[in-house]
Amino acid sequence: MQLTHPMRILPAVAVMVMAVPAMAASYRLTPTDDTFAYSGEPDTAHGALSGLATGFTWPHAEAGWITYLKFDLGAIPADEVITGATLHLYKFMVGAGYASIGTNLFRFGNDAWTEDSLTWNNQPLGISGSGVPNFGTLVGSSPDGFTYVGWSSWDLFQQSAWNPAADQADGMLSLQLAEMYGGDQSHNWCSKESDPTYCPAQAGHQPYLDVTTSAVPLPAALWLGVTACLSLVGRARRRRG
């Protein structure tokens, strides 16, 4: 039997190696920190409370309550790329305001804050000259209005504005929640410190982030397969000789 020349099988081997499907994985992450900033108590940290809040109310027409969450992405291997991410929060009580208006989700890059120290006056992105808090990049929105009680979710890829590579590189993801409308309205969510005071059925009602990933085949893996096949062919030729 005549053996095929090694160079003739290179393309086929490359195709076979590249055709191996990328392995998908999923992760459920709980926040390392979650808190809210309240303009009515500008120097008070609220990280120890079992509730989170978003809202605007008179006389804070452009201020109110802003929720912050931070997630550690360190459990995701470096050779996996985030392909999906959904934030889940449980709304435990009816709020106030406009029944059909929901909540926006923003991503920002300053991960130095902690729930024990964040206040209205030292928010990670600061406050504008007019007293309005600065926000990061809008990545998703939830339509659930103030009359809704239960789980709400935000797709971080909804706006196609989030590139997770930077957050994977530094291992942390920081998020802001704020109302979609600057009128009188509010939402109240369970925090990771949830207890029966705020969340009567608190078991499993803490915030979490569902992440899906895909492993990217590395060039080294491709050439490893090619080299192995060439080695086998070479051995067969030597035995025939």
Image (tube, rainbow, N blue to C red):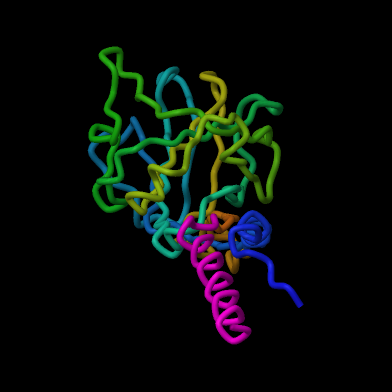
In this view, the residue in front, 32 or 86, is 86
Which quarter of the picture shows residue 171?
Answer: bottom left
Image quadrant holding the N terminus, namely bottom right
Q: Is residue 52 left or right of residue 86?
A: left
In the image, what residue occupies the spot 50% across and 35% down?
A: 162
Q: How many marks?
A: 0
The verdict on residue 144 being magenta is no
State the residue at coordinates (56%, 21%).
181
Taking 213 as reference, is 139 above or below it?
above
Percent position (x, y) of residue 157? 59, 37
In this view, the residue farthest toward the top is 130
User: In this picture, which residue range is highlighted in magenta?
Assistant: 216-241
By secondary structure, the bulk of the magenta-drawn segment is best described as helix
Q: Is residue 216 above or below residue 126?
A: below
222 drawn magenta: yes
Query: Where's residue 146, x and y in %?
Result: 65, 35
Q: Left or right: 187 with respect to 4? A: left
The C terminus sits in image quarter:
bottom right
In front of the other: 145 or 155: 155
Instruction: Tell me what residue is drawn at x 44 percent, y 37 percent.
Output: 176
Whether residue 103 sits left or right of residue 76 in the image: it is right
Closer to the camera, 84 or 152? 84
**What residue do we see at 69% from left, 72% from top?**
3
Which residue occupies the extreme bottom position in the image?
239
- Outermost front residue: 241
Q: Position of residue 139 (x, y in %)?
A: 53, 32
**Image location of residue 147, percent across then percent down:** 70, 37
